[in-house]
Amino acid sequence: MSEKVVLILVDGMRPDGLMQCGHPFARRLTEIGTCYLSARTVLPSVTLPCHMSLFHSVDPDRHGILTNTYVPQVRPIEGMFDRFDKFEKKCAFFYSWEELRDLSRPDHLHTAVCMNQHKRQGTDNLLADAAIRYINEERPDFLFLYLGETDELGGHDHGWMSEEYLKVVNNAVGCAEKVYENLPEGYTLILTADHGGHGRGHGSDCDEDMTIPICCVGPRFEAGKAGEGGSIKDIAVTVAALLDVPPAKEWEGKTL
């Protein structure tokens, strides 16, 4: 039986940042779901390449996006939005960084909301509230919510794991909790990140940049389980399994 999925990505959220931000929902996630706190992203550990790998379940050298500038794929791979729409799943996208618009090809989304102001404090909260309203009104099969303040206002402005960074992570986790508490019955929540960071940047192969959390809460995930391994490329395959959609043949990840 298929479920519905809300995937929340907090840009630049390190697993230790999640667990040290001071928000009680971070600890609660480890109690009510399966959490992979040493999962790996892809190289380069940069926002758009990582998102493309998340949505297309391949490494950047396969999808061809190596910087934050989108270029058309030479050998196109179906992304999650395109794949799920083919199987008549209602998909929605709420985000604050316009460069992510190419995660979906035209005419595969039921709803897309872009608040292109990720450098402005409060945008994460506005997007979370808008997503909650939409979920309860429209009951999408798959909704992707991107929260961008942690990367820009936390990591790049003040440094990863700084006091200011942890405050922004705390707020993003609060947004995730608000979404979770307002989910109708039948939804699974996945909380993750695209990359980590160190100093005031990211993009390298160091552990601080490459390690991400993947926390899954729903009836198919064991409560209180500490998952081992995990990759950003596994998320698309996992969401497809929850929606009862066969993965695209090019996808390389495995279901969590």
Image: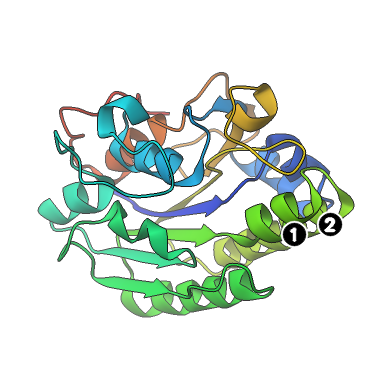
Query: Can residue 23 be spotted in the picture?
Result: no
Residue most extreme to the right: 163
The disc labelled 1 sits on which kind of residue?
Answer: Val
Of helix, strand and loop, which one carries label 2? helix
Instruction: Name the residue located 15 percent from the left edge and 28 percent from the top edge.
Output: 249
Residue most extreme to the top: 228
Instruction: Name the residue located 55 percent from the left edge and 73 percent from the top edge.
Output: 117
Q: Position of residue 131 (x, y in %)?
A: 46, 72
Where on the picture, by quarter, is residue 137?
A: bottom left
Query: Can residue 77 be spotted in the picture?
Result: yes
Is mark 2 in CB contact (under 8 Å) with mark 1? yes
The answer to whether residue 198 is left or right of residue 106 is right
Residue 45 against residue 166 in the figure, above or below: above
Q: Which mark is residue 164?
A: 2
Local crowd size for mark 2, using a 10 Å CA cut-off: few (<14), some (14–19), many (≥20):
some
The answer to whether residue 44 is left or right of residue 2 is right
Residue occupied by mark 1: 168
Instruction: Name the residue located 70 percent from the left edge and 51 percent from the top edge.
Output: 156
Q: Position of residue 8 (x, y in %)?
A: 51, 54
Foreground: 214 or 3?
A: 214
Local crowd size for mark 1, using a 10 Å CA cut-off: few (<14), some (14–19), many (≥20):
many
Where on the picture, by quarter, is residue 167?
A: bottom right
